[in-house]
Image: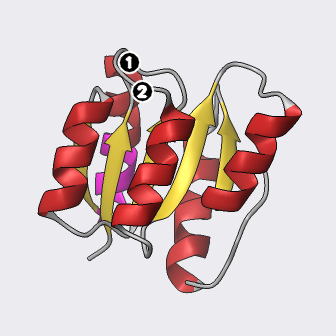
């Protein structure tokens, strides 16, 4: 079973994403801040991490590097509703496998997760 960590401070996003992914058969853990995300990464190995850029206690891009160092096999999908500058985009390209602009289509998310699970070496650019 695919283990997925969702990190976002918006309850509606956590609810809809987790429901969609659980219906696809994934084991989903949700957290609303960077501190809890790091605790979960230390406790368990995740196949995929959906990570928001703007969290109440952390910058998601900084957190992305920490997660990558702590769990190099975790595929990180950056989610954001804000535009990223070129330096941020390059950082994201270096440490994540996908950039998912908000709002996103839940059917598209299911397809992307299936692609990542089916092709562990895949690096997807932008959804």
What's the residue at 18%, 51% (across, down)? 40
* Quarter of the rendering occupied by the N terminus: bottom left
Query: Residues in magenta?
Result: 18-26
Q: Secondary structure at mark 1?
A: loop
Residue at the spot of label 1: 10
The reply to whether the C-beta atoms of the residues labelled 2 and 1 are less than 8 Å apart is yes
- Is 112 included in the stretch rendered in magenta? no
Q: Relative to the observer, which residue lies in front, 18 or 37?
A: 37
Q: Residue 32, located in which quarter of the rendered image?
A: top left
Residue at x 63%, y 38% (from the top left corner): 105
Residue at the location (40% across, 55% down)?
67
* 14 and 92: which is toward the camera: 92
Q: Is residue 127 visible?
A: no
Q: Is residue 70 above or below residue 107?
A: below
In the rendered image of this protein, does residue 71 appear above or below residue 98? Answer: below
Question: Overall secondary structure of the magenta stretch?
Answer: helix
Quadrant hosting residue 125? bottom right
Q: Secondary structure at mark 2?
A: helix
CA separation, marks 2 and 1?
5 Å
Q: Position of residue 74 (x, y in %)?
A: 42, 68
**Other-residue count near label 1 (Cα within 10 Å), few / some / many at <14 / 14–19 / ≥20:** few
The colour style of the image is secondary structure
Q: Residue 16: x and y, percent?
A: 38, 33
Q: Which residue is mark 2?
A: 13
**Of 8 and 18, the residue lying toward us:** 8
């Amino acid at each position: 079973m695919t283990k997925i960590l969702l990190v976002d401070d918006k309850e509606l996003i956590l609810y809809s994403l987790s429901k969609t992914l659980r219906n696809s058969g994934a084991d989903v853990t949700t957290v609303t801040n960077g501190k809890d995300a790091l605790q979960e990464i230390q406790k368990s190995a995740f196949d995929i991490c959906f990570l928001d850029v703007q969290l109440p206690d952390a910058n998601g891009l900084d957190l992305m590097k920490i997660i990558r160092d702590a769990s190099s096999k975790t595929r990180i999908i950056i989610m954001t509703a804000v535009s990223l500058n070129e330096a941020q985009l390059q950082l994201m390209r270096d440490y994540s496998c996908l950039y998912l602009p908000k709002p996103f289509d839940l059917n598209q998310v299911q397809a992307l997760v299936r692609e990542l699970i089916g092709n562990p070496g895949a690096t997807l650019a932008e959804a």
